[in-house]
Amino acid sequence: MWQELNETLARLIQLYERVLILGKEKRDAMVVVDLKALDQILQQEEQVTGEILSAEENRKIILQKLAQLESQINAGTKLGELCRYCPAETAMKLEQLHTKLNQVTKEVSAIRDANRVLVSAALSAVNYHLNVLGDTTVAPVYGASGSEHISKSKKFDFEA
């Protein structure tokens, strides 16, 4: 059972490392506005995310089985605490996997946050240029009726 947990954690690390690589590729694609590459990256990210969800479900099932064998383990037991309950030969490997998983998830979180800022800035730039072209200022929210808030009248007939 402990070996299954180690294998699942190792798989999660591999998947998160793949997400990290895809996040860096996504950033590069957004910087150069390569929409085709960005679309491919998003598809790959979606696939990897599905695999992560599957591995997480497997991890939860293993923890439930371990909880049945060891009364001190429950659904709320943190991964770092599990080392106290596992065999000595497994504890070191489990601790290494725990440390590596924490590290890679922090890196994924950092690249995700950086990409979020980049996307937000790109969207602001697009809105600015659209507003310049149309000589309008459109707020990024909609009114109660679902219509846009436009501060200047449009010079172009966009429905033509």
Image (spheres, grey):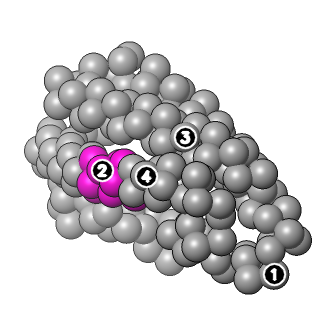
88 vs 74: above or below? above
User: Is mark 4 in CB contact (under 8 Å) with mark 1?
Assistant: no
- The answer to which quarter of the image holds residue 151 is bottom left
Q: Residues within 10 Å of mark 4 (few under 14, many from 20)?
A: some
Which circle marks residue 122 in the picture? none
Give the CA separation, mark 2 to mark 3.
16 Å
25 vs 17: above or below? above
Local secondary structure at mark 4: helix
Residue at image x 37%, y 25%? 38
Residue 148 sits inside the magenta stretch: no
Give the CA separation, mark 1 to mark 3.
25 Å
Circle 3: residue type:
Ala
Residue receiving disc 3: 10
148 or 8, which is in the foreground? 8
User: Is mark 2 in CB contact (under 8 Å) with mark 1?
Assistant: no
Give the CA separation, mark 4 to mark 1.
24 Å
Residue receiving disc 1: 71
Residue receiving disc 2: 107
Q: Is residue 122 visible?
A: yes
Whichever of callouts 1 and 3 sits on the residue coming sooner in the sequence is 3
Residue at image x 59%, y 53%? 90
Whichever of callouts 2 and 1 sits on the residue coming sooner in the sequence is 1
Mark 2 against mark 3, which lies toward the viewer?
Answer: 3
Residue receiving disc 4: 96
Stretch of the chain drawn in magenta: 101-113
Apparent side of residue 13 relative to residue 89 in the rendered image (left or right) = left
* Tag count: 4
Residue 106 sits inside the magenta stretch: yes
Whichever of callouts 2 and 3 sits on the residue coming sooner in the sequence is 3
Q: Main secondary structure of the magenta part?
A: helix
